[in-house]
Image (cartoon, helix red, strand yellow):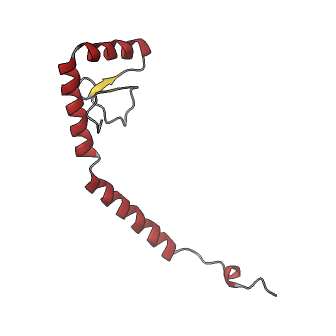
Amino acid sequence: MAAGMPILGNRHPTSPVEHGISGFLSDDPDELLSYADMLLADKDLAARMGEEARKTVIKRFSLEKFKEGFAHSIEIARRKWETRAIDSNEFQSNDR
């Protein structure tokens, strides 16, 4: 999608692909083959759908959203670390 290519894939509720807009989705291999043939035969359609796919990546998977999500994950991990239960045996020396 980021490369501006239309996508062919299986249907899934979390897929970022919009059927008929940024690619084609189907659980039937023969249907996907017919969509692939359609895109190969119609370069303008492939280009339009590829551009929509690229726009989807920019909108849904931007660097800014990635950085926000990553910073949020680090903050959650930091809080868990600070509030973890400490085993008193952890600090006893094994050199006895």
Relative height, residue 69 to residue 92 (above, below): above
Relative height, residue 54 to residue 36 (above, below): below
- Percent of width and height locating residue 29: 43, 16
User: Where is the C terminus found, in terms of image quarters?
Assistant: bottom right
Relative height, residue 70 to residue 6 (above, below): below
Q: Nearer the viewer, residue 12 or 57?
A: 57
User: Where is the N terminus found, in terms of image quarters?
Assistant: top left
Query: What residue do we see at 21% from left, 33% from top?
Result: 52
- Percent of width and height locating residue 47: 20, 26
Quarter holding residue 40: top left
- Percent of width and height locating residue 31: 37, 13
Q: Nearer the viewer, residue 48 or 30?
A: 48
* Number of marks in the rendered image: 0
Query: What residue do we see at 37% from left, 17% from top?
Result: 32
Relative height, residue 95 to residue 13 (above, below): below
Quarter holding residue 92: bottom right
Q: Nearer the viewer, residue 61 or 40?
A: 40
Query: What residue do we see at 22% from left, 15% from top?
Result: 42
Quarter holding residue 70: bottom left
- Percent of width and height locating residue 83: 50, 75
Q: Residue furthest bottom?
A: 96
12 to the left or right of 41: right
